[in-house]
Image (tube, rainbow, N blue to C red):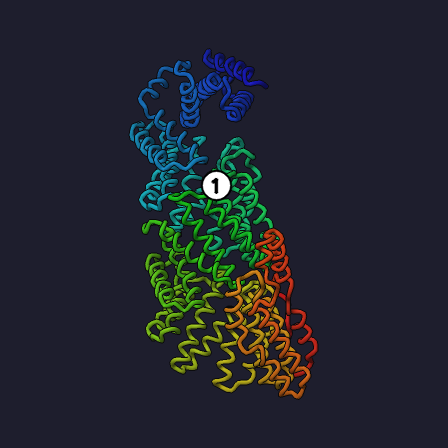
Amino acid sequence: MAIIWLIVVLNRRITDAARGRTNRVLDTMALAKAAQLQRRIDANRASRLLAPAACTLGWFHWMRYHSLPDGSDTGELESALEWFGTAISVSARAPIPHEVRRVFTDGHLQQAQAATEILERMHHVDDQAALDHAIELLHTAVSDTPPEYPVLSAYLSHLGIALQTRFERTGSLDDLNAAVTACLKAVTMASADDTGRAAYMSNLSGALRSRFACTGNRTDLDESIINAQGAVDEASSTDPNIPAYHSNLGSALRIRFVLDSALDDLNAAVIAGQHAVSASSPNDPQIAVYLSTLSETLRTRFERTGGVADIRAAVDLSRAAVDVSTPGHPHFATSLSGLGLALRVRFEHTGALDDLNAAVTASRAAVEATPLGHSDRSDQLANLGIALRTRYERIGALGDLDEAVAASRRAVDETPSEHVDYADHQAKLGLALGLRFERKRDKADVDEAVTVNRAAVDATPPGHLNRASYLCGLSNALQMRYRHAGAMKDLDGAVTAINGAVDAARPDHPDLPRYLSALAGTLQSRFEKTGALEDLDAAVTANRTAVDGILPNHPHFAIHQYNLGVALRTRSETTGAAEDRREAALLWSRAAGSVSAPAASRLRAARACAQAIAELDGPAAAVVMYRAASELLRLLAWHGISDADRQYLLTNEAGSLAHDPAACAVTAGDLRQAIELLEQNRSVVWSQLLEARIDLTELELAHPDLASKLHRCRTVLDEPAHHDASPRLRAHAASRTGGIGIPIEDR
């Protein structure tokens, strides 16, 4: 039915109600016609019929307000005032009740409406001055509105939204506390039949969830979930905010899962997120938020269960969020950043460098799409730093690490020290600095890593979600400095910090294996200093628990296996227990065959395994493992990184690999194989170090496009995924029916 005819039909019913036939505005047919007119007008606010339609809807709800019994009419008055306000904003002479016009001339409704329009614009533009003005208007509207006016709840809830929005930009806890207070008053003052009650509860849920993230107060999270669920339960089927209610509920449930590890919460969060996406329209200004929120929830479930379908869907949803939020949209940069996170997590599962490269690209684009001074820019910089750091750990390109440090430092510099994310950005900077210290051995880097990690810990109260992670970062930095300078106070501090991290993490926390591995490292360092065997035994136990607590296809699984092997070897050297060394060799062989692990980790494990086999079963038994280790050199120093990076990796990781295999063959009496191995390894190392290939310099000068294509072809041919020593390792395991009998697995 056309808008004009809906206006005519409803006006007839309004006239009949004014003559005493109140059922004409109370029956279901009247409600259906009003809802139909509202949908038509909402879909076309530019219509020339907006003023008469708004006036008609205002009179419809006004008559219902006067016709319904006391106590069940509150929502009608609010709706009437909202539509009358729309009518006179379009046409000052719109026919509205005299007492309503007096309300508008009192000023508070116009102030609230002006503030609401500003908040609506904030979905599309970022304007701090306008946001401050909206908050001032809403404060005035709240103070000028008599307590008995039902619209006061709406004003309070909108004030809460505005204050929370400003908190997200400034990190001011005062704003967030004020937002919670305003939203709580809105819910408390609203009657049970207030049509806005569901929205008030959802807004309160969001404010409480944000405060929990800052303070770790569990009561806030529990109350957030109660209110989010209440909003979903109380919403009418025609409520346009239903997608937001479900999305808020999903976010709160996901956070509770992170705390309690209750899979029911996580599954319910996924369902809520799916409802939010399916219930939203393509032109919903928040659709990118719903898509990104569901992506984050699926990513969390993948990290818990390993379900590949979840991470694939998470990446697809993040791509969809980017697609629906065009450049300039407030959610465009955050959608890009979310895509980078999803791609990086998928890389950690598959080891596909395409995903990791795309993650870096998306994260960098998110930074570029966020203007200087924007509150989200520091988060985008921090995420870029993580992606670059991950790529450095995978391929060893120093340029990535330097850029990761720079991005992480800018994230700290662009975050006010009182902002709730300041500590998190400091901790991320500490991780990048620690990695660079290990590469460059510049003491200034490790000193700064200790400083920023300690500051992150000091700024984070006990019980905070991130405190364990920050303690682990501090422990790692202190241990690095201890190994560099030998100060016992650094080692003692490292042990204290990592024990705090382990104690703060629940038994099934996804990062607990990392904390346990770090604990084992500090205990082993202390054993090497003091000779206390109980420290070494505890290191073996911690490493073993770390291995047992991580999925076999995780990139860090091989690293934890390698660390356990090192602890067992150390104990074997101390006690003479051969079974410890045999288990270490078994662990190293599995780590060497793990295709999801970084090449450097695999090569390190293969060398250690070959050395252990030589000691246990004789040099001849180690030759095949050494040969397989040699093949990993191509993975380590591929041509996608610079010559300097390749030289560093070969110098530090290849070690004596050029001659150890040949020495084993000589000892075993196989001179022919010794010469073969010597030439093979020498040729690999020297060809990589000296770049024994065609020099493209002259071609680049004469035909730059052709040189670029040739370089890309060379890089693709040297892509690590195309050169894998795992088949050789498996063949070695299959051929050995005696001795150590090492199984090798592609995980």
Residue 29 lies left or right of residue 384; in this view the side is right
Q: Is residue 720 visible?
A: no
Tell me the quarter of the picture where residue 154 sits. Answer: top left
Residue 163 lies left or right of residue 22; in this view the side is left
Q: Is residue 639 visible?
A: yes
Quadrant showing the C terminus: bottom right
| Residue in view at x 35 percent, y 32 percent | 134
Residue 136 place in picture, x, y as percent:
31, 33
Q: How many marks?
A: 1
| Residue in view at x 39 percent, y 37 percent | 161
Using the image as rendered, state which of residue 449 and residue 581 is in the foreground.
Answer: 449
Q: What residue would you read off at disc 1?
A: 331
Give the residue at the far top of this rendering.
19
Quadrant showing the N terminus: top right
Label 1 Cα neighbours within 10 Å, binned few <14 / some 14-19 / many ≥20: many
| Residue in view at x 50 percent, y 65 percent | 644
Residue 365 place in picture, x, y as percent:
49, 47
In the figure, 463 relative to 84: above or below? Answer: below
In the figure, 457 relative to 574: above or below? Answer: above
Using the image as rendered, state which of residue 114 and residue 432 is in the foreground.
Answer: 432
Residue 287 place in picture, x, y as percent:
52, 38
Using the image as rendered, state which of residue 24 and residue 70 is in the foreground.
Answer: 24
| Residue in view at x 48 percent, y 59 percent | 399
Three-letter amino acid code at disc 1? His
Secondary-structure class at tag 1: loop
Residue 271 place in picture, x, y as percent:
56, 45
